[in-house]
Image: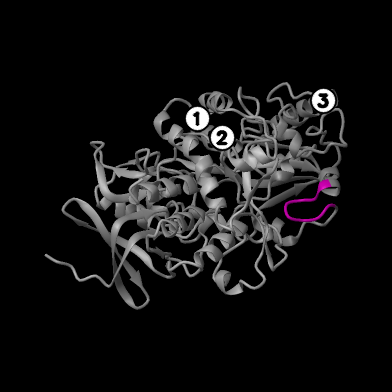
């Protein structure tokens, strides 16, 4: 039966984050007409909340900055972290990344620079202490306000964002703003409040999709293919339960629209999935309203430690967010409650470094205390009682931690020995910039929950970002990238910008394939 379509294009892109907009722009640069559909009223997805990093080794911005790196070092590092699983997908990413950045930088609106930020496993062979991540240059949108009027984010400051001095865009919003201005010079159609509901399969090929809009269903034929770059399903409780993803949607820092609609449509069209129990983890500071904050770089400062329900430390508190978040998740699965766990500090810490989202020396507000997001007590024993931990256990943990602080060496987890630790420490504190004793009451505990920046499992794809069925056959016309695609990073987060970098690179590979190479 012949279908009557409401619209037609060459490339239909679901999502409007960094990868999705990259795919649309690169399609346009190849003479292909793209249509971008975004279910939310705002554009940008989780990219708009992010710092905007792209972990793309060996790219031109790295070379311009004089970063000393090699493919051998990159492979050594990824062998030690990501591992051998699906090596072919990893190689496709590393091989393609530099060329994707080269192509983007041919557009006058796109420019990137390397910024120092350590690889997340900086103790592993092949790691770079100053990192491999690149960022879009900050972007003054004066004169281009119309192009970015529907751009979402950034995160509120209390959730780990920053106060962006408009009209300049920073982080992920700088990348998005530049892409939107560049797309404004093409015939690309971007439609908001337009949710992909189902894929249309004709003769075994995905021929287009049906979207729901405020005006009713809207069908679009896609001559070359459909790219799903619409984020994960972290905001959908039923899908989290179905696939066994720990945590709660309220604890996610992913975009509000990330409820898995694109992934469900792909599954209905025959796509197989992988890594669907995985996430990009982070320790989330509980806020009084029940949400969480990503603002936890303060845990790298001396004078704070994290404990589980047994009153014991379980990791280097200064670890990169995914490593520490994963330690919370895995520790909880091990039989000792880590949900919640508690970041314990003394009053000296509060006076020096601040508390939660407060400035140094600020009083802890009543909302924090009454909600239980923060617990305070004059002694460690009383604090332990109030957070449900055995007093002697917490006191013993703090006593041991204080000994390590005095000696300048964490004998349990090596805190302060990693380049990442020192990046967020207090350089003026000696002998270890990340270790300091807890000695002066009152003592305080911040409630910490297993947050996520999104799920990382999804459609199983080949090296050209083509969706695969369970028998490894390709579904013609269907592609995925970003958090709608099962990540090449497996159970690891190798460096800042891995999620956005993945979305950008595999969106580019998808469009390249649609365009015939």
Residue at horizontal 47%, vertical 60%?
A: 16
Question: Which class describes the residues within 10 Å of circle 2: few (<14), some (14-19), or many (20+)?
Answer: many
Residue 118 placed where, x, y %?
Answer: 67, 36
The main secondary structure of the magenta stretch is loop
Magenta segment? 353-360
Q: Determine whether, in the image, residue 259 is placed left or right of residue 281.
A: left
Residue 370 seen by the camera: no
* In this view, 447 is above or below 306: below
Residue at horizontal 26%, vertical 36%?
A: 472
Residue at horizontal 68%, vertical 40%?
A: 117
- In front: mark 2 or mark 3? 2
Nearer to me, 153 or 34: 34
The residue carrying mark 2 is 494
Residue 374 is labelled as: none
Which secondary structure, mark 2? loop
Question: Which class describes the residues within 10 Å of circle 3: few (<14), some (14-19), or many (20+)?
Answer: some
Residue at horizontal 24%, vertical 70%?
A: 5
Q: Quadrant of the N terminus?
A: bottom left
Which secondary structure, mark 1? loop
Nearer to me, 474 or 389: 474
Which mark sits nearer the N-terminus, 2 or 3?
A: 3
Nearer to me, 175 or 483: 175
Do the residues under discs 1 and 3 have CB atoms within 8 angstroms? no
Which mark sits nearer the N-terminus, 1 or 2?
A: 1
Residue 408 is labelled as: 3
Residue 116 placed where, x, y %?
Answer: 70, 40
Outermost residue toward the bottom? 215
**22 in the magenta segment:** no
The residue carrying mark 1 is 82
| Scheme by which the image is coloured | one colour
Residue 17 placed where, x, y %?
Answer: 50, 57
């Amino acid at each position: 039966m012949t279908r009557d379509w409401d619209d037609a294009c060459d490339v239909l892109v679901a999502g409007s984050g960094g990868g999705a907009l990259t795919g649309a722009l690169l399609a346009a640069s190849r003479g292909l007409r793209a249509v971008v559909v975004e279910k939310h009223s705002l554009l940008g997805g989780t990219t708009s909340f992010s710092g905007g990093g792209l972990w793309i080794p060996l790219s031109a911005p790295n070379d311009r900055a004089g970063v000393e790196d090699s493919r051998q070092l990159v492979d050594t590092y990824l062998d030690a972290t990501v591992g051998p699983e699906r090596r072919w997908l990893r190689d496709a990413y590393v091989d393609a990344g530099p060329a994707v950045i080269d192509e983007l930088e041919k557009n006058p609106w796109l420019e990137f620079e390397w910024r120092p930020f350590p690889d997340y496993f900086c103790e592993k062979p092949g790691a770079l202490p100053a990192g491999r991540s690149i960022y879009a240059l900050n972007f003054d949108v004066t004169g281009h306000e119309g192009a970015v009027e529907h751009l979402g984010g950034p995160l509120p400051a209390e959730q780990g964002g920053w106060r962006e001095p408009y009209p300049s865009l920073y982080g992920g919003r700088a990348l998005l703003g530049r892409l939107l201005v560049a797309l404004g010079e093409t015939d690309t159609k971007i439609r908001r409040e337009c949710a992909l509901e189902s894929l249309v399969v004709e003769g075994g090929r995905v021929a287009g999709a049906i979207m729901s809009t405020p005006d009713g269903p809207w069908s679009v034929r896609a001559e070359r293919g459909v790219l799903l770059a619409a984020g994960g399903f972290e905001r959908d409780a039923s899908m989290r339960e179905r696939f066994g993803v720990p945590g709660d949607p309220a604890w996610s820092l992913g975009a509000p629209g990330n409820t898995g609609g694109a992934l469900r449509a792909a599954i209905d069209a025959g796509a197989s999935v992988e890594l669907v129990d995985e996430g990009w983890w982070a320790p989330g500071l509980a806020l009084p309203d029940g949400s969480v904050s990503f603002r936890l770089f303060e845990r790298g400062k001396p004078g704070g430690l994290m404990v589980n329900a047994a009153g014991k430390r379980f990791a280097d508190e200064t670890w990169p967010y995914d490593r520490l978040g994963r330690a919370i998740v895995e520790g909880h699965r091990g039989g000792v409650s880590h949900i919640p766990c508690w970041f314990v500090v003394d009053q000296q810490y509060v006076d020096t470094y601040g508390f939660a989202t407060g400035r140094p020396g600020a009083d802890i507000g009543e909302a924090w205390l009454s909600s239980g997001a923060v617990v305070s007590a004059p002694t460690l024993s009383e604090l332990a009682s109030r957070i449900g931990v055995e007093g002697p256990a917490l006191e013993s943990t703090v006593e041991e931690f204080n000994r390590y602080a005095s000696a300048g060496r964490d004998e349990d987890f090596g805190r302060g020995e990693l380049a990442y630790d020192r990046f967020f420490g207090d350089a003026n504190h000696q002998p270890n910039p990340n270790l300091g004793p807890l000695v002066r009451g009152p003592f305080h505990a911040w409630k910490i929950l297993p947050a996520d920046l999104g799920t990382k499992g999804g459609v199983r794809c080949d090296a050209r970002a083509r969706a695969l069925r369970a028998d490894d056959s390709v579904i013609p016309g269907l592609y995925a990238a970003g958090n709608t695609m099962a990540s090449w990073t497996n159970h690891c987060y190798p460096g800042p910008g891995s999620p956005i970098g993945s979305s950008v690179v595999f969106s580019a590979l998808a469009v390249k394939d649609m365009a015939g190479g």
